[in-house]
Amino acid sequence: MNSKLSPLANKGYDPAYRRNQIRSTGFLAGLFFLLVVAFLLSLRAGSYNTPLSQLIRGVFGKAADEKINLVVRNNRLPRICTAIVSGAGLGVTGCVFQAVLRNPLASASTLGVSQGASFGAAFAIIVLNLGAVGGLGGMAIPFCGFVGSMAVALVILGLSRFRQVSAEGIVLAGVAISSMFTGATTLMQYFADEIQLNTLVFWTFGNLGNTTWADVGKMTGVLLCVCVYFFLHRWDFNALLSGEETATSLGINVKRLTMVNILLCCLTASVIVSYIGLINFIGLVAPHIVRLVVGNNHVYLLPSSAMAGALLLLLGDLFARVVISPVILPIGAITSFLGGPLFLYLLFKGGKKEC
């Protein structure tokens, strides 16, 4: 039912729709401009003080000093690309989670996907003792984190498919799953030695600086594939806004749409979290911010959520790098510290509008 719901009645004829279209397009352009600015600021940040023009040339390996090329291409640029790809992935998956579950509180962190990845990493580091072998740059910890995340996805799919649990019930189940995995991870930490505990804590704090170009490529490949699928079903998400019965009457297989999109969202979030660690609130806050401007039309909500997520994570990483430079704060703590108050503000603002 991908393109069958194209709103012929609205497109180009309804003045309100046209105004929303212009506003949403302008908002997307504004997000892109801010993302470029954040990219340049992040490229400039660091202890290696260099003119911005040389840094831009260093992106292409054309800087006058070979050291600049090495710093930019091997250090700063992979970190920036990791932030953009990861933030975009968390933002768009949060948007789709909220659409198919019809719950504004749904995201990878509230459904337990991120906590499942944390448990998988803890299991690899403490029980299998793979931290010293794979390290943060190896495949052992990301793979086990991915397995833990997909275990949560299977539980969510099982509840949706076989137990017929409602969308609200799945979110509540996610809270219970998060608590269970958090408790299990804490118990394993209790029996860990000092080296294992340091490795695990460093991973769970979130880190954008240990990914390689190969890691960025894998995350980008997964993100592009799922984003194409999400965008092809943008009208299906719009139909779900009117209720499951309305969507079914329009020819949408709601159960299949829900299951497939939950699985793809869990896959994307688990791949991202498995490489960079726990990042909270990006997938929850980004869709809420852009929804204030573009509304619930997923034609614009999906790309806006991706760009807003990328911008938020990139700005959060920039803040973590410069606030007490040269010390780099953990990005997971920064997103939680700044994202929590921002989300509360959005809730209060939304509540005032409803009154």
Image (spheres, rainbow, N blue to C red):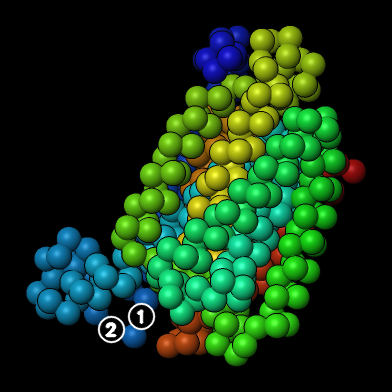
The numbered disc on residue 49 is: 2
Q: Which residue is mark 1?
A: 46
Relative to 81, does residue 158 appear above or below in the rendering?
above
Identify which residue is drawn at 49% across, 30% down.
Answer: 229
Q: In terms of depth relative to the viewer, which is nearer, 272 or 30?
A: 272
Q: Position of residue 309 (x, y in %)?
A: 54, 53
Relative to 325, does residue 246 appear above or below in the rendering?
above
Q: Assess whether mark 2 and mark 1 are in contact (beta carbons under 8 angstroms).
A: yes
Total labels: the figure holds 2
Q: Amino acid at mark 1?
A: Gly
Relative to 245, does residue 74 appear above or below in the rendering?
below
Q: Amino acid at mark 2?
A: Asn
- For the residues labelled 1 and 2, the Cα–Cα distance comes to 7 Å
Identify which residue is drawn at 72% across, 58% down.
Answer: 343
- Toward which corner of the image does residue 120 lie, by quadrant? bottom right
Residue found at the very far front of the displayed protein: 128
Q: Position of residue 293 (x, y in %)?
A: 62, 41
Identify which residue is drawn at 42% across, 51% down.
Answer: 219
Q: Is residue 24 visible?
A: no
Q: Position of residue 251 (x, y in %)?
A: 66, 10
